[in-house]
């Protein structure tokens, strides 16, 4: 995983939580059921390690939970407001305009690929974070195959933070200019998530992503 925009974002020191057997690691991405996963890792005695300053071991699987970039961004905006003690109604027209143009405020809205820099694609096992029990069942299957029993209930924390007006943000997303900026900002996330999940990458998203040296041949659909 490489950075197509070096210098655009603040440096991100990659950390993961490694199993006692050293064969599996969980790599956290904010707003992707990370609170519960960190809780589980602590219960199981997994250790926190930095991976950005050393080669990733060939024998170790990196378990990563990823989320649709738009869904994660909407949730991340709500988290950002909550963390700062604000509500949506506190944002005036100018503040909303800045948010609409800037997009990235903190770790909860920072692109997901930034949490995975330096990881070999071949060592990553991705699980999709979606509403309902599908995420929990898939993660349980993945972890069981790797020799661990894991619980997870992504719906448990939904609604924990004050929400944002989904319809107003959906109107933003329907605007071609905004959607173009969003896809440019998070194009790497779209490509990476869909590729790791073995899904086709729509042409609009594929075109928005900056190609990187050493890319694997992309799966795509017109």
Image (cartoon, grey):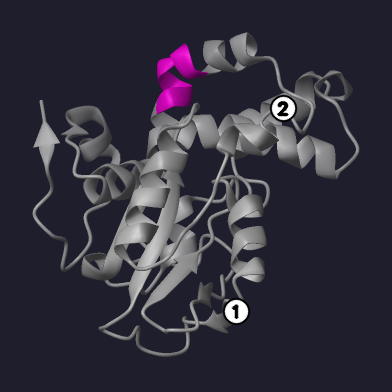
- The quarter of the rendered structure image containing the C terminus is top left
Q: Is residue 202 located in the magenta-colored stretch of the structure?
A: no
165 or 103, nearer to the observer:
165
- The residue range painted magenta reads 173-179
Task: Indicate left or right for 110 with 4 as reference.
Answer: right
Q: Which residue corresponds to the image point at 42% horizontal and 57% vertical from the top-left?
A: 64
Q: Earlier in the sequence, mark 1 or mark 2?
A: 1
* Circle 1: element type: strand
Q: Is residue 160 above or below residue 126?
A: above
Task: Indicate left or right for 162 with 41 as reference.
Answer: right
Q: Provide residue 165's location: percent of width, then percent of height.
A: 69, 15
Residue 206 in which image quadrant: top left
Please name the predominant secondary structure of the magenta segment in the image: helix
Q: Provide residue 55's location: percent of width, then percent of height.
A: 35, 88
Q: Which residue corresponds to the image point at 54% horizontal and 10% vertical from the top-left?
A: 171
Q: Which residue is mark 1?
A: 48
Q: Provide residue 113's location: percent of width, then percent of height.
A: 42, 57
| Pointer 2 local density, CA inside 10 Å: few below 14, some 14–19, many at least 20 | few
- The quarter of the rendered structure image containing the N terminus is bottom left
For the question of whether residue 107 can be seen, the reply is no
Q: Is residue 174 located in the magenta-colored stretch of the structure?
A: yes
Q: Provide residue 37's location: percent of width, then percent of height.
A: 58, 56
Q: Which residue is mark 2?
A: 159
């Amino acid at each position: 995983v490489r950075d197509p925009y070096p210098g655009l974002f603040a440096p991100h020191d990659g950390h993961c939580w490694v199993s006692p057997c050293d064969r599996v690691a969980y790599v956290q991405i904010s707003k992707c059921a990370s609170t519960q996963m960190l809780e589980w890792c602590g219960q199981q005695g997994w250790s926190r390690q930095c991976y950005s300053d050393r080669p990733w071991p060939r024998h170790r699987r990196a378990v990563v939970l990823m989320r649709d970039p738009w869904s994660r961004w909407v949730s991340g905006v709500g988290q950002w407001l909550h963390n700062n003690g604000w509500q949506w109604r506190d944002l005036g027209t100018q503040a909303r305009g800045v948010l609409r143009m800037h997009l990235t405020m903190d770790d909860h809205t920072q692109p997901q690929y930034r949490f995975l820099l330096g990881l070999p694609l071949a060592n990553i096992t991705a699980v999709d974070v979606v509403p309902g029990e599908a995420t929990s069942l898939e993660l349980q299957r993945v972890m069981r195959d790797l020799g661990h029993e894991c619980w997870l209930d992504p719906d448990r924390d939904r609604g924990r933070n004050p929400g944002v007006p989904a319809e107003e943000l959906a109107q933003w997303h329907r605007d071609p200019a905004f959607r173009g900026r969003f896809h440019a900002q998070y194009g790497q996330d779209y490509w990476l998530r869909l590729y790791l999940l073995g899904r086709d990458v729509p042409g609009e998203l594929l075109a928005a992503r900056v190609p990187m040296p050493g890319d694997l041949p992309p799966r795509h659909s017109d």
